[in-house]
Image (cartoon, rainbow, N blue to C red):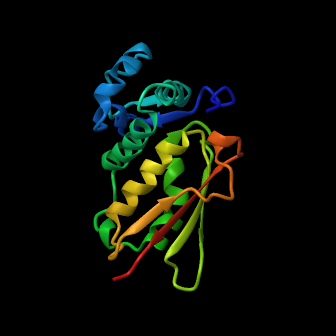
Amino acid sequence: MQNHTIDPTIELNGDTTYAFLSSINASEFAHILEKHGLNDIDRTQWYPLHKVLEVLSDIAHANNATTNLVSIGMAAVANAALPPGIEKITPEAFFKQYEQVYPTRHRNGSPGTVTATMVGDHKMHVILDAGVPYPDDTMYGVFYAYMRLLDTHGGFTVAYPKDRPRKAEGGSETVYELTWHLR
């Protein structure tokens, strides 16, 4: 994870940052939060993105990294102010809106982009190109949690395409394939 290119003025909102404390695995990385001074997060404040990324980098290099990063992404969704009735929005409609929602969690600069592309005639498959500074597994947790909230009727999958290298493998961005099934 490269955070040295992040503009030091960009901030992440407190609700999203609070995912560190509300993650189901928070106790596993509490010492990392304390080391970086993020063990007491106010949901109404803004936090330097570079500091959040330093914490995520340390978590990524610690034990149980994948599970911990996914749990943080899932907690970020649980903390987000979501519109009423989100469970009735189709995945394709939601992820087209997410392109505009993602930047609103940040201020003072660009935190990268997420672009949604619908695939196929039945619109039951979306490709998300995530050119964001967050670890791949954290964003996986975000997308997984949103899919759980959405009315996918017959289940869903979130996967990394095997033919595209992720950021963690040296790619410039990470691509996620989201597929849902109708009953």
Q: Position of residue 106 (x, y in %)?
A: 51, 41
The residue under the point 31% across, 37% down is 23
Where 141 falls versus 96 (above or below)? above
Where 19 falls versus 143 (above or below)? above
Farthest residue to the bottom: give it: 121
Q: Position of residue 44 (x, y in %)?
A: 34, 34
The residue under the point 57% across, 56% down is 160
Where 48 falls versus 138 (above or below)? above
The residue under the point 46% across, 25% down is 62
Q: Position of residue 52 (x, y in %)?
A: 49, 29
Q: Quadrant of residue 24?
A: top left
Tell which of 153 and 160 is nearer to you. 160
The residue under the point 33% across, 22% down is 30
Q: Position of residue 10 (x, y in %)?
A: 57, 33
Tell which of 65 and 76 is nearer to you. 65
Viewport quadrant of the C terminus: bottom left
Viewport quadrant of the N terminus: top right
Tally of numbered tags: 0
